Image (tube, rainbow, N blue to C red):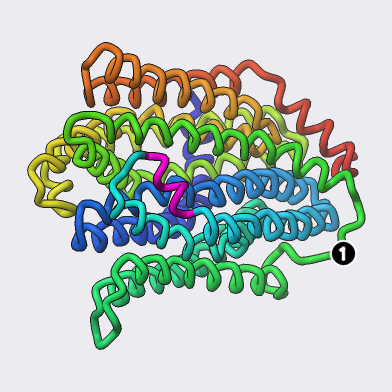
Amino acid sequence: MDLGRLRTVWTRVFALAWPVMAEQTFRTAMRTTDVLVTALFSPAAVVAIGLADLYGRFPLRIGLGLGGGAIALSSQDTGAASVQNRDEAVTQALLVGFLLGLPFVVVGLLFGQPLIAVFGASSEVVALGATYLAIVFATAPFRLVALVAARSLQGTGDTRTPMYVNVLANSLNITGSVVLGLGLFGAPRLEIVGVGLATATANVVTATLLVAAIASPQTAASFTRPRKLVIVRQLLTVSAPRMAEGFAAELAEFPFNALLLGFPSGEAVNAGFQIGRRIYQQVTGPLSRGYNVAASVLVGQSLGAGEPAEARYDGRAVAALGVLTVGTIGLLLVVVAPWGVRLFTDDPETIRYATAFTRVYGLAGGALVAFSALSGGLQGASETRIPFAARTTGMFGLFLGLSWLLGETLGYGPVGAYVGVVAAYVWMALVVAWGFDRSDWASRAAELMAERGSAG
């Protein structure tokens, strides 16, 4: 093993990833704050915001999918020094993102209650969840623009500008959730409405600042008048499997949450799942997202520069670093879980299930980050079909299917869900590892670059 080469790549990974990690730390801290604040209202409020967030992640998945296409084209064209094509891809991605966010505004206003009610939750949970969903969906177009703009800049190698903007916006979000939710410093106590308003405000602020940054001369990317239909076609071709992957993950969670609610003490089981996953995401999510972005940028720029062997090495190096760091942290979570969950709740039943789910996610940590890093590498190469296949089969076949078989059909209850969660993430990691090693994604990227005129 060439340790000097590996050290050089890991240094580049850290330079690209740490701003993303810092940004995501604040983002996950914001979501954790929302759970902590709503936990002070009632267990029903925790369940309500968790169920509403299932729908709230649909705009997120579209934004990440479209952002995946943007970071692929942006990184490849940056590596190929094709500035005009890169700027056109950025411009078109932002326009498409805003348009795709508009239907969510209508959905949130008109269909909030029936959407929450499908889980069979109590009337209190339905009312609270619908209110929160309507407020957050009102700013869905801005949320999509923010996600796409951040990834467009990251594709150029600029991971700091999105960090500065997101840290500011999420700090405002955290402050707003606490002040408006709890009614501090003379503000009205709006409870779950206040938490929703803080999130909506942060979405608008983030989108506005990132668009202003791209329009300014301070960033490498800029806006230009769209001229090439081939660019928007490629953008959608690369983004579509990424969006479908996200949708599959979210759709599988609907019956999974219903499964948890159907167990004895169902609300405690579901609240434990929400808390356990939130702890894991708070501690390790920022690192996984950082490695995902770093892999996309390194692989995409190496391919743009005509160095496919370097791209393959970069992707593997990022995955190895992720397993080493996040895998270790996951094992530590297994040990400290009983103490961590007590920050969220003092209900004994909820503590028991939250501790178990925290340990489950800790054990799956190495597989999760391997999937994230290698998916990022494939995304940088415009190959988003393999991660789609991995996540779809894992979520429906194991996360949901195996959990249902063991938990409901065979009667093992929540233990069946624990097994299904771990099995799903291990499977997903194995599939993308095979795809990264065996598929000819470098040739696919070269063909797409030649088609849009970004490579000679």
Q: In this view, does 111 lie to the left or right of 182?
A: right
Q: Is mark 1 on a helix, strand or loop?
A: loop
Residue 227 picture location, percent across and down: 92, 56
Q: In which quarter of the image is residue 366?
A: top left
The one nearer the camera, 149 or 251, is: 251
Prevailing secondary structure class for the magenta stretch in the rendered image: helix
Residue 242 picture location, percent across and down: 62, 37
Residue 311 picture location, percent across and down: 65, 33
The one nearer the camera, 337 or 222, is: 337
* In the image, residue 189 above or below residue 33: below
Residue 115 in the magenta stretch? The answer is: yes
Tell me the quadrant of the picture where the C terminus can be found.
Answer: top right
Residue 193 picture location, percent across and down: 36, 69
Residue 414 visible from this viewpoint: yes
Q: Is residue 358 left or right of residue 404?
A: left
Query: What residue occupies the far top of the structure in this picture?
Result: 410
* In the image, residue 387 above or below residue 303: above
**What residue do we see at 90% from left, 51% from top?**
228
Q: Quadrant of residue 444?
A: top right
Residue 332 visible from this viewpoint: no
Q: What stretch is highlighted in magenta?
A: 112-119
Residue count near mark 1 (Cα–Cα under 10 Å), binned few <14, some 14–19, many ≥20: few
Residue 149 in the magenta stretch? The answer is: no
Q: Is residue 166 left or right of residue 301?
A: left
Q: How many labels does the image show?
A: 1
* In the image, residue 22 above or below residue 424: below
**What residue do we see at 73% from left, 55% from top?**
96
The residue at which mark 1 appears reads as: 225
The one nearer the camera, 374 or 94, is: 94
The one nearer the camera, 354 or 51, is: 51
**What residue do we see at 84% from left, 53% from top?**
85
Q: Which amino acid does label 1 sit on?
A: Arg
